[in-house]
Image (tube, rainbow, N blue to C red):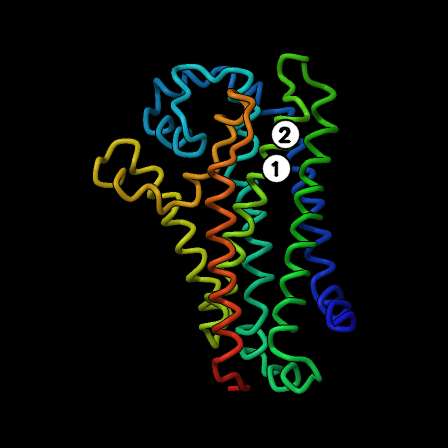
Amino acid sequence: MIGLLIKIWYEVRWPVKFFSLGLGIIMCLLTILLPKVLGDIHRVFEKMPFVKPLITALLGIDPGNQLTAQMTQAFLWVHPTVLTLIWAHEVMYCTRMPAGEVDRGTMDFLMSLPMSRWKIFIAETIGWILTGVIILAGGLLGHSIASNFLRPEMQASFRQAAFVILNLFCVYLVVGSFSFLVSSCCDRRGRAMGIVFAVLLLSFLLNFLAQFWDVAKLFRFLSVLEYYRPAVIIQSNTFPMQDIVILLSLAGLIWGAAGTVFRHRSLCTV
């Protein structure tokens, strides 16, 4: 398995480095710039009312007519650019195997290794988790560096930041597990990536529609963002136990299903 992990690292090391560096830079810039940009958000709400439901969908709570310092810190962790970078990494990583291997004609070589399919799947899972930790750590580092230049009332405590990053990592586990499942069912990597991105977009759209459509509220529990609300965590300063338990349970079920499909389906170069 060590040899396979080394192979995985050589395949993904540069994208992981770029994603980690990119997330760190973006978090640094957002931490410094967002408080200034969002200071006059009430004027934006007056001129473009549709912006408020978008921010409410991301934060998970109504920000009112003005974003407080705490709300600004919470918005950093749900900014579309941040979520897109994190999700782009794991969609690219988790669709490498088996869909990517079948698509580029290397599945026969992978299956010829003296390892069971479960060991291959576990090795890919270890790489996915470790690379996710590296990228999230890069974002947290960028945020921590930039926070030193903020006023004390604008800074979130280490406890709050730890709770938020743990909740975000649980979301990372759910999205990655789903990506593994879709990849295990597909023979084309592009198709698998398209399906995952479409589901993620639908998840956000559901959260947005639930702000003003009663029918969407009934299905809001299906959105992964429903269980990731940094604003609530920072305001209450409490550990989101219920959301994390739900996300971990869902990730475990989907990951198990993905491994089962990968183990039993017919895999060969097409």
In-front residue for pair 116/52: 116
Q: Which mark is residue 165?
A: 1
User: What's the distance in space between the residues labelled 1 and 2, CA to CA?
Assistant: 6 Å
Above-or-below relation of 159 to 165: above
In-front residue for pair 15/213: 213
Q: Position of residue 125 (x, y in %)?
A: 63, 62
Looking at the rendered structure, the secondary structure element under dot 1 is helix
Asked if marks 1 and 2 touch (Cβ < 8 Å), the reply is: yes
Above-or-below relation of 62 to 210: above
Q: Quadrant of residue 53?
A: top left
Q: Quadrant of residue 139?
A: top right
Q: Position of residue 170 (x, y in %)?
A: 55, 45
Q: Residue at x 29, y 38 (%)?
A: 209
Looking at the rendered structure, the secondary structure element under dot 2 is helix
Residue type at mark 1 is Ile
- Around disc 2, counting alpha carbons within 10 Å, would you say few (fewer than 14), some (14 to 19), or many (20 or more)? many
Q: Position of residue 241 (x, y in %)?
A: 51, 35
Q: Which residue is mark 2?
A: 161
Q: Position of residue 143 (x, y in %)?
A: 68, 31
Residue type at mark 2 is Ala
Q: Residue at x 64, y 32 (%)?
A: 162
Q: Quick check: 112 left or right of 250?
A: right
Q: Residue at x 32, y 41 (%)?
A: 220
**Quadrant the N terminus occupies:** bottom right
